[in-house]
Image (spheres, grey):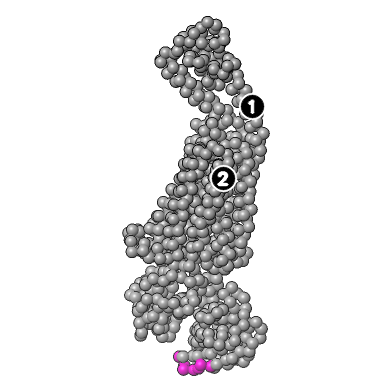
Amino acid sequence: MTQTIAPRVRTVVLLLLAAACALLAGAGPASAHAAVTGSDPGQGAVVDKAPARITLTFSEQVALSDDSLRVLDPEGKRVDTAKPATVSGTTYAVPLHSGLPDGTYTVAYQVVSADSHPVAGAYTFSIGAPSKTSVSVSGQSTDDGAVGWLYGFGRYVSYAGFIVMAGGAAFVLACWRRGAGVRPVQRFVVSGWVALTASTLALLLLRGSFTGSGKVSDIFDLSLLGQVLQTKSGAALVSRLLLLAAAALFIAVLFGAYDKREDAEEKRDLTFGLSIGGVVVAAGLAASWAMSEHASVGLQAGIAMPIDVLHLLAVAAWLGGLGALLVALYRAPAETPVDAPAVRRFSQVAFGSVLALIATGTYQSWRQLGSWSAFTDTRYGQLLLAKIALVVVLVGVAWISRRWTGRLAETVPVEASAVREKERVGARADGTGETAVVGTGETAVVRTGETAAVGTGDGDTPAEGEGDTGLDTDEQPGTESAGPEPADSERAAQLARQQAARDTAQRKRMRDADPNRFGLRRSVLAEAGIAVVLLAVTTVLTQTEPGRTEQEAKAATAASASSSADEGASGALTLNMPFDTGGEDGKGIVTIDVDPARVGGNEMHVYVERPNGRAFDIPEVKVEFTLKAKDIGPLPVVPDHIATGHWSANGVQIPMAGDWQVDVTVRTSDIDEVTVSKNAQIG
């Protein structure tokens, strides 16, 4: 049965790894975690004269390089004059040459978000009137290519290595301490350490190219590596390498000194020390992800990071322990099979891990999505639904494994008593303790003082040797033992080894023939297969723009489009303009509604909201209308405060139709003030 199971296991594992790679290959360029929420000029806008600079506002702070913001004319030549700089908060600008001719210009940006992921894209605006352009805005993402694929695969391997190493070691210490001396389990845990170490080194080398040019030739550029080491992501990877050195010492003690300890009290003390040290090292490794990814930015980062650490530890305890259990069930030697109590203890650990995952996962989902609609309207939400479905299936299969464990526990006492009875039948002694039979099968080796012979298991018929050595010495009065010939001793030892091997194989066949153990093997194998796919989905999820950010970006894009649209003579006009005065609570969105947006009297409403959509009051808001083509204005309007975040003005006069510039001055404190502008067709 073992011979037929092993190829099947290898086939299943290869298929699951192929599925995981397919999922990772689909991670593609959707891995931007900061989004453009505003720009000036806006996307697709047509301005009368060349702007002095281009500004971009992101949903979170980003890291800039010399070429992060580029502005290209219709011929593809750069027209920006200096390095990009921070204007305020999350708004960045790059100056332009003066006197730019009419035509369509391309703004290309390539930055690194605060959670360590590259963000790239492009849009166009026009001066005077749109024109043809030779610039292609497709394929701007640096993570769409060989380097991006390698980086994504490296992230998957690093997660898998951490789970295998931490979860496998936890399984040994908490569930099956005899496993510390089982070679396949040792190889399983060590392979996790090797995978995590190798992938961390690879990510350090790939990081510079991944966030920059995306070229394979830049992977071994030492200058880029030096820049990476100065970033938050580089510091996290270096910290992970240092902690892996401590993890190597932990593994050496676990599979070395710990396994060799015979004294129960010493082993108990060492178990306590290894448990504390292992938790500290594992938590530190998990923090190397939390400090540089989703949890480190956005809402409640101080709470989100420790919760993310707890989430990763729970995943490792469950899935890594599951992998170690699978190895023990299939590869543990017959002398030290994994027993039912160990499986029951792991079941309890897995149950606690699932509870922790539900609690931490619920918080993470709320933090990254922000609304129920994001589950279906964003890619992050769709992947999260797939992850939840896989977890539910995994828990269902684990429940089946729990049933098999209960049945196995009922059969273990019966098997143990049968083995002991067989050993009693196969062993004989003369009452003095000097004669013993080696072996429990059909053949046994009998040793009497200095004489050794091989006989049948019942000791009645000798198989080889001098005299009637198949009987005890008490049955041969007057017989003196003259000592065995050397050849007979070697033959006896050889047959003893052969018999021991046959006994081991027989016990393994008996163990594998147990339908309860076979059922547990299959259910655990199914769990491990689902876990591989679940890990792939989780890796893609960490590379995907959070649903909350994606929805904010969509809203900003829609607002930008509506601001430049002609609503017609009888249609209301809505302008959404992000602002940032630079002071405390100085960031928000001001919305101008002009109805019916025609020549003559109009009704105007002004709404001020925070980036999360909550209305709030500010000390002052003023609006001015300017028609530069006819040299009219600015026409000031001071609206009246109506409610929280809401101002209104009636009878706003628009003297003629045209492309009006709407300037809104927002003051959030005595000294913090900013003016934002949009052009709109009125009348």
The mark closer to the camera, 2 or 1, is 2
Q: In front here: 75 or 79? A: 79
Q: Position of residue 91 (x, y in %)?
A: 47, 77
Name the residue located 50 percent from the left edge and 31 percent from the top edge. Answer: 3
Residue 343 lies, with reference to residue 372, above or below; the image says above
Report the label total.
Answer: 2
Q: Are marks 2 and 1 in contact (CB under 8 Å)?
A: no
Q: Earlier in the sequence, mark 2 or mark 1?
A: 2
Residue in view at x 44 percent, y 83 percent: 47
Percent coordinates x, y for residue 182 in the rendering: 50, 37
Q: Which residue is mark 2?
A: 269
Circle on res. 6: none
- Residue bounds of the magenta highlight: 629-635
Secondary structure of residue under mark 1: helix
Q: Looking at the picture, which amino acid does disc 1 mark?
A: Ser
Q: Is residue 504 in view?
A: yes
21 on left or right of 593: left
Picture residue at 38% right of the left edge, 74% below the top: 70
- CA neighbours of label 1 inside 10 A, class few (<14), some (14 to 19), many (20+): few
What amino acid is labelled 2 in the image?
Asp
- 447 or 680, which is in the foreground? 447
Residue at the far top: name it.
Answer: 478
Residue 144 in view, yes or no: no
* Residue found 53% across the figure and 48% down from its top: 274
Q: Is residue 79 magenta?
A: no
Report the side of 153 relative to 370 (left or right).
left
The image quadrant that residue 304 belongs to is bottom right
Q: Position of residue 251 (x, y in %)?
A: 48, 46
Q: Residues within 10 Å of mark 2 (few under 14, many from 20)?
A: few
Residue 396, x across and y down, in percent:
63, 46
Q: Is residue 145 above or below residue 93?
A: above
- Residue under label 1: 417
